[in-house]
Amino acid sequence: MFGFDWKTILINVPITLVALTGHELAHAWVSTKLGDPTPRMQGRLSWNPLHHLDLFGTLMMILTGFGWARAVEINPMYYKDRKKGTALVSFAGPFANFLMAFAAMLIYAILFIIGEKTGIGGGFIGIAGSLLYIFAFRNLCLMVFNLIPVPPLDGSKILGMFLPNRQYYAMMQYQQIFMVILMVLCLTGIFSNVIGTGVNFVFNGIMHVINGLVNVVL
């Protein structure tokens, strides 16, 4: 947990805003591409954080590392296959966080190589590297957290594509109960080890790919 270190919180605010906004924008964009006009009509096809943020969810994200934005409203009736379309829209958010994390780590690797080759290094690359690392870490936390297959998280809707309708809709009836449990687990820090394990696994995988790309290019 990040606690109440104001310096850390001030660093995490813009990073959190970008991570959450990109996540929700991806949901809105994919739903729109599948024929649903609802996100566009509600102004959700925007990089403006004010169009997406949930106050309590954002505070939770800044203070604990796990949180949420205001859910994008969708109308699956516009999809050719409602369950598949809903799963694709749900997957889009975590995937956007993965792409943002990958981009940040790739830029970090490029800056590190430039610093080594030019000898510039020092303060700028150190600060930029730290911010990029935090940005990547924050996005991966959001990705892993949302892929947990319990309502109302994205993972439950992705799982729903593989469940019979009866079991899927029965699970969705308990969204509020699961939400309370998730908040308690976040606030108590119990999730830290679980999410941390998933984040480290993905982080190491991305670094392995980037290192391979660097070795090929150089």
Image (cartoon, grey):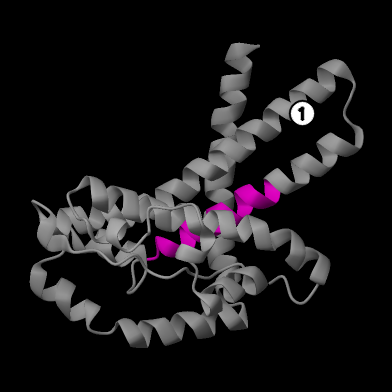
Image quadrant where one finds the N terminus: bottom right
Q: Is residue 67 visible?
A: yes
Q: Is residue 155 magenta?
A: no
Stretch of the chain drawn in magenta: 133-148
Residue under label 1, please give it: 112
**Residue 174: x and y, percent?**
27, 84
Q: Residue at x 82, y 43 (%)?
A: 127
Element marked by disc 1: helix
Q: Residue at x 18, y 64 (%)?
A: 75
Which one is nearer the viewer's eye here, 31 or 82? Answer: 31
Where 88 falls versus 6 (above or below)? above
**Residue 51: x and y, percent?**
46, 64
Where 206 falls versus 169 (above or below)? above
Q: How many marks?
A: 1
Q: Residue at x 64, y 55 (%)?
A: 15
Type of the residue with mark 1: Phe
Image quadrant where one finds the C terminus: top right
Residue 38 placement: quadrant:
bottom left
Q: Residue at x 9, y 53 (%)?
A: 81
Name the dominant secondary structure of the magenta segment.
Answer: helix
Which one is nearer the viewer's eye here, 139 or 51? Answer: 51
Image position of 95 (left or right of 34)? right
**Residue 182: x and y, percent?**
46, 79
Where 200 falls versus 147 (above or below)? above
Image position of 55 (left or right of 162)? right
Which one is nearer the viewer's eye here, 78 or 167? Answer: 78
Where 81 falls versus 128 (above or below)? below
